Amino acid sequence: MVRAFVMVKTAAGKSAALQERISTMEAVLDADIVTGQYDVIVEAEGDEVYTLIDTVATDLRDLGGIVDTRTYICLS
């Protein structure tokens, strides 16, 4: 299994609704609203790096109200 943390920047006022939607996605283990440069931190897991990246690139980025994402693949 491959794990990653995805930092999500949302449009103003969209964090709570997006956090709820992101939490229900199949690859998502956890999603929390945070303070700082990004608004939501997502912990995700997939069978392969490609599967995980594809999930972020398509499912997550297709949600309305997401401005930017940064994905960090766990090495250990």
Image (spheres, rainbow, N blue to C red):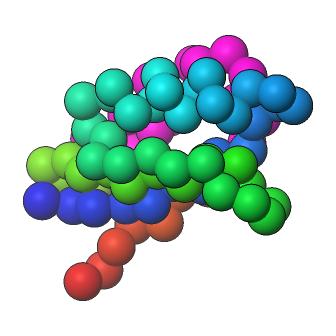
User: Per the image, is 58 magenta?
Assistant: yes
Residue 60 percent coordinates (x, y):
51, 30
Q: Is residue 20 above or below residue 73?
A: above
Give the residue at x 63% y 31%: 16
Q: Is residue 64 above or below residue 28?
A: above
Image position of 17 (left or right of 38): left
The reply to whether residue 5 is in sight is yes
Give the residue at x 45% y 46%: 31
**Count of picture labels:** 0
Magenta extent: 50-69
Residue 54 percent coordinates (x, y):
38, 36
Taking depth in this image into account, of 54 and 37 the one nearest to the observer is 37
Q: Quadrant of the C terminus?
A: bottom left
Residue 4 percent coordinates (x, y):
37, 61
Residue 50 percent coordinates (x, y):
29, 46
Taking depth in this image into account, of 28 and 13 the one nearest to the observer is 13
Q: Is residue 32 above or below residue 18?
A: below
Q: Quadrant of the N terminus?
A: bottom left
Image position of 57 (left or right of 26): right
Give the residue at x 39% y 67%: 73
The reply to whether residue 60 is in sight is no
Q: State the image quarter where residue 12 is shown.
A: top right
User: Per the image, is 40 magenta?
Assistant: no
Q: Residue furthest right?
A: 12
Image position of 14 (left or right of 7): right
